[in-house]
Image (cartoon, rainbow, N blue to C red):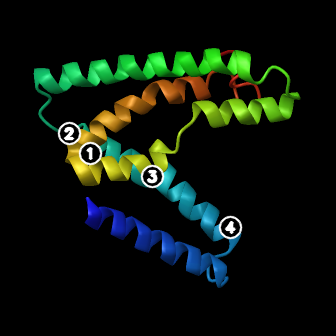
């Protein structure tokens, strides 16, 4: 676990240094982010599902999915109460920040590093409801329905 944390810290430090020294342009950083989100993470998720799914793993995955849906519903209820007094732009930003974690970008590699393919499978399942709630109605109104 400590080795993984050190590895992630080193990669973050390298990325920070490359950005700070101008060796990576904004466009390059955006392209690298897109590469990770649209290619590397989906490939890792796909790979994590290519395992023998025992009854125990399937039951755990279903329980994780259920818990994640409950969490997202609780977030949506909190959003209805907490941000009513804000203007629309700020309210949408706060709602998004409440409902969306960074578990996909950083959490999934950590889950795989610590727990292997099964951990990545569980992390992937946990993020399904979050993706559903985010994509609910489109870009600007995505959280208005929840």
Please give the label number shown on residue 106.
3
The answer to whether one can see residue 101 in this image is: yes
Which residue is located at x 67 percent, y 82 percent?
22
N-terminal-most mark, 3 or 2: 2
Please give the label number shown on residue 27.
4
Which residue is located at x 62 percent, y 32 percent?
98
Which residue bears the numbered disc 1? 47
Q: Is residue 121 above or below residue 135?
A: below
Q: CB of mark 1 within 8 Å of CB of mark 3?
A: no
Helix, strand or loop for disc 4: helix
Give the spatial CA distance, label 4 vs label 2: 34 Å
The quadrant of the image that shows the C terminus is top right
Q: CB of mark 1 within 8 Å of CB of mark 4?
A: no
Q: Is residue 20 above or below residue 112?
A: below
Count of numbered marks: 4
Q: Dot 2, how many residues are within 10 Å of its Cα: few (below 14), some (14-19), or many (20+)?
A: few
Q: CB of mark 2 within 8 Å of CB of mark 1?
A: yes
Give the spatial CA distance, label 1 vs label 3: 17 Å
Give the spatial CA distance, label 3 vs label 2: 21 Å
């Amino acid at each position: 676990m400590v080795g993984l944390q050190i590895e992630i810290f080193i990669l973050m430090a390298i990325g920070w240094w490359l950005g700070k020294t101008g060796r990576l342009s904004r466009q390059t950083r955006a392209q690298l982010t897109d590469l990770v989100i649209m290619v590397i993470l989906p490939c890792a998720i796909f790979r994590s599902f290519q395992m023998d799914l025992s009854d125990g793993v399937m039951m755990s995955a279903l329980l994780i999915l259920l818990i994640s849906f409950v969490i997202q519903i609780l977030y949506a209820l909190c959003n209805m109460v907490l941000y009513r007094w804000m203007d629309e732009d700020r309210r949408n930003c706060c709602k998004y920040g409440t409902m969306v974690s960074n578990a996909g970008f950083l959490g999934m590699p950590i889950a795989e590093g610590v727990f292997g393919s099964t951990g990545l499978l569980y992390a992937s399942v946990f993020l399904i409801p979050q993706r559903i709630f985010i994509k609910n109605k489109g870009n600007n109104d995505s959280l208005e329905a929840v």
